[in-house]
Image (cartoon, rainbow, N blue to C red):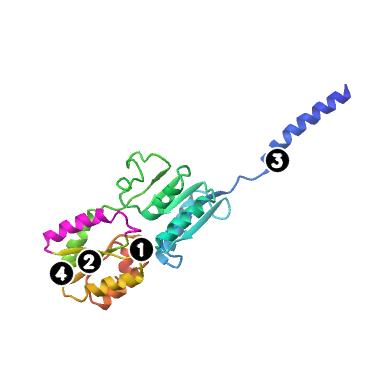
Amino acid sequence: MRRRRFISLLGRAAAAWPLAARAQQPNPMRRVAVLQTLAESDLEGQSWVNALKQGLAALGWTDGLNIRLDVRWAGGEANLIQRFAKELVDLHPDVIVAVATPSAMAFRRETQTIPIVFTSVTDPVAQGLVETLIRPGGNITGFTIFEPEIGSKWMQVLKDIAPETTRTAVIFNPDTAPYYRLYMSSIEAAGAFFAVKTFEAPVRSRVEIEAAISGLAREPAGAVISMSDTFTVAHRDLIIALAAQYRLPAVYPFRFEAIDGA
């Protein structure tokens, strides 16, 4: 009888050990993958990541304490964006934060299961990232702050500051701004209204940026619109410097670009 009782008690204890061990372990650290399309040295990009950290901390999630942020910086390079998206998905994070359109699209290609929250995406419906703004569907949702019709306002502002403008180059990288036609349509319509010839100036490197702007400056009455694009934002220092060097009127989409000297 004592032997049977001993075996019975031992079995109960063994069954309880895993439960007790789990009860003593702290909650597992959650992982958040963040793909920032700007360079790590970019102060504006740093401010966005810091804002995310502060927002999470306000909700009780502190980086290094109960949450881990895995951040990658792509510096506006399309090949790095896709590579880092795969690298971050392979870490099996609990949630993904995708900054800007190319980041969101790269993650969408890598996973249909991990939750993705995007920011600063141009027309997520038109680009197939979500089904509708009200009901995104799938594993992705987020925020959009862009309206492609703003292109017509850029043209109007350009004519206000430089009425003599008759030619405008729209600078963008088609690899990081696959949505560029959304903006070009409104820019071209406004250009026709203001009697300004508009043309696309696709660029994929700093050398091509310099060639595009220097070529524009060879004839009078030229101007620049720097599209809302990860690549042009990442290389805004060069665009700003060249526009100043050639004394070209220029319009930029973001306030921080004006602060940087645009």
- Residue 198 vs residue 258: left or right? left
Looking at the image, tell me whether mark 3 or mark 2 is earlier in sequence order: 3
List x then y, in percent, for residue 134: 33, 40
In-front residue for pair 212/189: 212
Residue pictured at 20% horizontal, 63% vertical: 199
Marks 2 and 1 in Cβ contact (< 8 Å) = no
Mark carried by residue 21: 3
| Residue 146 versus residue 137 in the image, above or below | below
Find disc 4 in the rendering and name its residue: 165
Would you identify the image quadrant in which residue 206 lies? bottom left
Q: Residues within 10 Å of mark 3 (few under 14, many from 20)?
A: few
**Residue 15: percent from left, percent from top:** 73, 32
Could you tell me residue 227's position as x and y percent?
28, 61
Q: Are marks 2 and 4 in contact (CB under 8 Å)?
A: no
Examine the structure image and report whether residue 32 is included in the region drawn in magenta. no
Residue at mark 1: 231
How dense is the environment of label 2, judged by Cα within 10 Å: few (below 14), some, or many (20 and up)?
many
Q: Where in the figure is residue 122, as x and y percent of width and height?
A: 31, 52
Q: Which residue has dot 2 on it? A: 169
- Give the residues drawn in magenta, as a range: 174-195
Q: For the residue labelled by badge 1, is the local secondary structure a helix, a strand or a loop?
A: helix
Asked if labels 3 and 1 touch by Cβ distance under 8 angstroms, the answer is no
Circle 1 crowding by C-alpha within 10 Å: few under 14, some 14–19, many from 20: many
Residue flagged by tag 2: what amino acid is it? Ala
Of residue 157 and residue 74, the one placed in the foreground of this image is 74
Task: Give the quadrant of the N terminus.
Answer: top right
Query: Comparing marks 3 and 2, which lies closer to the viewer?
Result: 2
Q: Earlier in the sequence, mark 1 or mark 3?
A: 3
Q: Amino acid at mark 4?
A: Thr
Q: Is residue 15 left or right of residue 105?
A: right
